[in-house]
Amino acid sequence: MVGAGVAGAAIARALADKGWQVDVFEQAATPAAGASGVPIAVVSCHVSVDDNPLSQLTRAGVQRVLAFAEKHLVKGQDWLDCGVLERRLDGHSKKKTWQAVTADSVWHGWVSTPTALQLAQAGLDLNAAHDQLWQARGAWIKPLSLIQALLNHPSIHFQGGQTLKATEVAALGYPTVVLALGAHTSDFLADLPHAPDLALVPVAGQISWGLHDATNKAFPAFAVNGYGGFVNHVPTAEGWAWYSGATFHRGQTGAKVTPQDHAENYAKFQQLLPQAARQLEAQWRTPDSLRGWSGVRCTSVNRMPVCRALNPAKLPSWYVLTALGSRGLTLAMVCAERLALEIELGSD
């Protein structure tokens, strides 16, 4: 296993649960050093009227990751199934139409129209319920906590500070190699004969965050997404925190916190939750009280994860799990378990 972000941790755990001994190589000294080091993530479905493959995959992903969190993480500290209000915005204040969910719909029990109380808590127009979706099974989760729990298995052996090249990994003689390197996958494969071009797209992004008074009633008790996102009342070592963002810079590989991305996050926040944005405006404009995190995610051209054998004909024992995009925490475990089954069948 190469890579100890959420994808690497998930596939390591899936294989370990099947009885495999797994060595996890990571360039950094600790897990979650790359894009998976984002301090907070929202777990939710990709909702579509036609129930496309990404929607089906995210439904399964939500069920799997929250079942694991319930068993292995501390609710309220590491994660919280608070629900997610999805605002149907496309970035230009244009509403996306959505029909009410009927009892025979695949979305029954997953999404609904938000209640007047939920809209009021978010400071939104009570007459605009049809423009929003309520995902009752949505949650926030701390990626580092999830990754540490996934790697906490007697058959998983983490090895940090490893700067191996692909050819060096091949020389180690492992019967199976899984690459979970996100945006760095193509660079890692550059010296490996017969490695395919995966056509991965790096996406740099920044989250803005800060500390707040937990008694502030201007913030909703649930997560909100749809144009950027907002999660609040998250416990940290420094106190209660809120998080907003993230930005999306397709094709960029640099990860740096910038005032420009803070400004972009705030502009999105003003559209997403105008009332909460006004409450935080002074803090947002005070550099000493505004924090940031930046990283580089990875996606594919069709936005679907890359979860398969690398080159079945030429590299039959090499696999890849990457391109989880901005839904990595939702997708990682369900994709890893499917890939682990493929690996197990291929090893027979």
Image (spheres, helix red, strand yellow):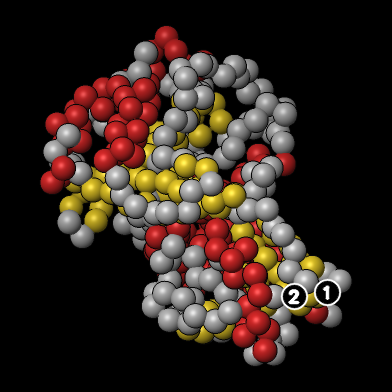
- Of 41 and 165, the residue lying toward us: 165
Could you tell me which residue is drawn at 59 percent across and 66 percent down? 187
Q: Is residue 311 left or right of residue 157?
A: right
Q: Where does residue 93 sit, x and y in percent of width and height?
A: 46, 17
Residue density around tag 1, few if under 14, some if 14–19, many if 20 or more, within 10 Å: few
Q: Where does residue 44 sit, x and y in percent of width and height?
A: 52, 42
Q: Is there any visible trace of residue 61 in the rendered image?
A: no
Could you tell me which residue is drawn at 43 percent across and 66 percent down? 32
* Residue that numbered label 1 is attached to: 314
- Mark 2 vs mark 1: give the one in front: 2
- Of 276 and 2, the residue lying toward us: 2
In which quadrant is the C terminus drawn? Answer: bottom right
Could you tell me which residue is drawn at 83 percent across and 69 percent down? 312
Of pointers 2 and 1, the one earlier in the residue sequence: 2
Q: Is there any visible trace of residue 25 in the rendered image?
A: yes
Instruction: Give the residue type at disc 2.
Output: Pro
Question: Residue most toward the front?
Answer: 191
When the figure is inspected, residue 216 is found, relative to residue 54, above or below; the finding is above
Question: Residue most toward the bottom?
Answer: 172
In which quadrant is the N terminus drawn? Answer: bottom right
Check contact, mark 2 vs mark 1: CB within 8 A.
yes
Q: Where does residue 316 sit, x and y in percent of width and height?
A: 80, 75
Which of the 4 image quarters holds residue 13? Answer: bottom right
Could you tell me which residue is drawn at 69 percent across and 57 percent down? 198
Disc 2 is placed on an element classified as loop
Residue density around tag 2, few if under 14, some if 14–19, many if 20 or more, within 10 Å: few
- Give how far apart the Cα atoms at labels 2 and 1 are: 9 Å
* Residue that numbered label 2 is attached to: 193
